[in-house]
Image (cartoon, rainbow, N blue to C red):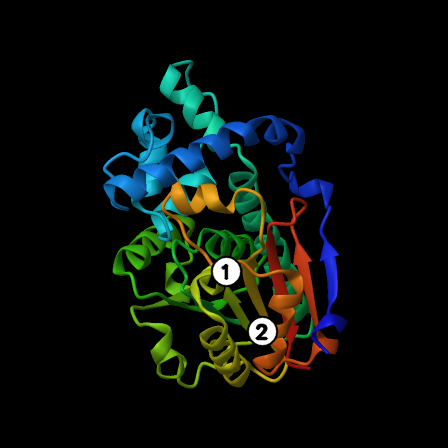
Amino acid sequence: MPNSIQIIIDSDSSLGYETKVLSNIFKFPLIFILTIWVALKKMILGSKLRTNTFWFDGISPVCRKIKENAMRWKALDTAYNYEFKKDNTFATRITDFWLNIKNAQAVRNRLKLVKKELKQEIQNLSDKKLEIRLLSIAAGSAQGVIEVMADFKQKGIPTEAIFLDLDPTALEYSKKMAQKLGVADQIKFVNKSVKELEEAVEDFKPNIIEMVGFLDYRPREKAINLIGKINQILDSNGVALISNIAPNIERYFLYKVMNWPMIYRSPEQLADVVVKGGFDPQKCEIVYEPLKIHGIAICRKK
């Protein structure tokens, strides 16, 4: 049964997780008010507003960039790599405020958790003297994967990878990052959709499959079908890392103010999807970052 999958909250202090929960309690009344305000504006003026609210995408160029690129790699890249308190202008203070809400913290926590799990799986395969063949589905900027590959290259442990993404700008960006970190020659960049997944991997037979964020946009039946494909192409000794966002108090703010709709799944719902996709619940676990917003289903073939 899906509910037999173990649910874990990772609390590894060495990762420097962001957990400023108390400050977000005081932010929520403003989040709630702005969400209602923008929802009413959209009801009256239509859903495609040039500026949703002065207090988010009006005053802050960074927040505007995130809103305009919602659901795409550029928005995530901005949230991942934003540097706080660069100056003391009003716009910067507003940006710092919004880039420190729970969901912004959680998505950066997700990056740290993904890197940790990837490192563990690559090390496990290396310890078994196995080749490491990694597939990143809907790779986006693939920052975490590239950084992990670079770390292992320095240790003398090579990894071979395929990055699959339908957005050519994402692949171009990830290729430049990979070149900068010296691992571009280990990666095949494939500009295809997940509908062409089997064709894209051909005889590659990955033993690590990473799909972070894409399930947030796949309805249940399509999610199950995709995970079924992942299960089929995964090598017999392989592992799949599949993330999904969980329901949380800020979800309507993301939807209305940030123009970022997603499909939220509870741990039980995520477990149900991976089991219906063909993975044995006894060989899976779901690990959440400390804010319990982003979870990663770790599913093994054996």
Which mark is first along the chain, 2 or 1?
1
Report the front residue among 162 and 58.
58
Q: Position of residue 221 (x, y in %)?
A: 48, 77
Query: Against 227, is 136 above or below?
Result: above
Q: Name the one closer to the observer, 248 or 123.
A: 248
Q: In which quadrant of the rendered view does residue 191 lie?
A: bottom left
User: In percent of the image, x 40 and y 79: which residue is there?
Assistant: 201
Residue 221 shown left or right of residue 279 in the figure: left
Q: In front: mark 1 or mark 2?
A: 2
Task: From the image, tell me which residue sits under label 1.
Answer: 212
The residue under the point 39% across, 84% down is: 202
- Image coords of residue 167 (percent x, y): 29, 61
Residue 273 bears which disc, if any? 2
The crowd level at tag 2 (other Cα within 10 Å; few <14, some 14-19, many 20+) is many
Q: Residues within 10 Å of mark 1 (few under 14, many from 20)?
A: many
> Which residue is located at x 42 percent, y 23 percent?
94
Q: Position of residue 95 (x, y in %)?
A: 42, 27
User: At 56% across and 82% down in the image, what residue appears?
Assistant: 235
Disc 1 marks a residue whose amino acid type is Val
